[in-house]
Amino acid sequence: MEAISLIVRSIFVDNMIFAYFLGMCSFLAVSKNVKTALGLGIAVTFVLSLTVPINYMLENYVLKAGALEWLGEQFAEVDLSVFSLLIFIAVIASFTQLVEMVIERFSPSLYSSLGIFLPLIAVNCSILGGSLFMQQREFADVGIATAYGFGSGIGWLLAIVGMAAVREKLEYSNVPKPLKGLGITFILTGLMALGFMSFAGINI
């Protein structure tokens, strides 16, 4: 039940884009087309779902103070937490490279349309944010960490696909010229954030 609650909260209340505005560069650039947005959203969800639990295990069994005690008493005082950020980024970059190779192999058109934003998943602040929030919140076990990563990814996916759907419709609407492009996108992002954040008042 805790995992389900965390997934729902990650999607609607603690949404990476609408609550924390993380990953905005790719959100704004790729949300012009639903198909492309969906592809990137799935890739981000995949990377978040795998890197958060892996980084959780590295944090709790290797990096933080006393984590290496399972190797013996002589390692009980070892603290490798200074390397946390470096290790987290290395794990994220590895899975990003894997996703990039898979998409290039099986969907060249999507690979071409995503362009530079596919390899930039490695430095997408929402991906790193997932691991840093995991570290900060000290989840009880790897299952909860996995639920958080998955929920955060789904939240990001819904946000970018929703924005892409609206922007596709706006392309054929009478939007005032000064608001075309990023102007109306910023306004829509704020309005969608208010809609998502309205769930914050609900006890999930």
Image: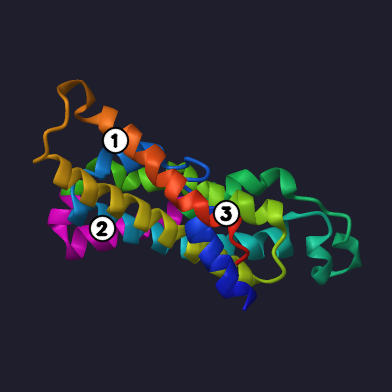
Q: Position of residue 90 (x, y in %)?
A: 52, 50
Which residue, given by chain and number where applicable, does mark 2 sit on?
Answer: 39
Three-letter code, disc 1: Thr
Q: Secondary structure at mark 3?
A: helix
- Circle 3 sits on which residue? 200
The image shows residue 163, relative to residue 183, as above or below, that is below
Question: What quarter of the picture does the N terminus occupy?
Answer: bottom right
Magenta: main secondary structure equals helix
**Direction from residue 34 to residue 201 in the image, left or right:** right
Residue 62 horizontal/vertical position (percent): 71, 60
Q: Residues within 10 Å of mark 1 (few under 14, many from 20)?
A: many
Q: Nearer the viewer, mark 1 or mark 3?
A: 3
User: What residue span does the magenta drawing correspond to?
Assistant: 93-112
Q: Does residue 116 appear left or right of residue 127 in this picture?
A: left
Query: Mark 1 sits on what residue?
Result: 185
- The Cα–Cα distance between marks 2 and 3, rounded to whole angstroms, is 28 Å
The residue most toward the top is: 178
Q: Residue at x 31, y 38 (%)?
A: 28
* Nearer-N-terminus badge (2/1): 2
State the separation of the CA atoms marked 2 and 1.
20 Å
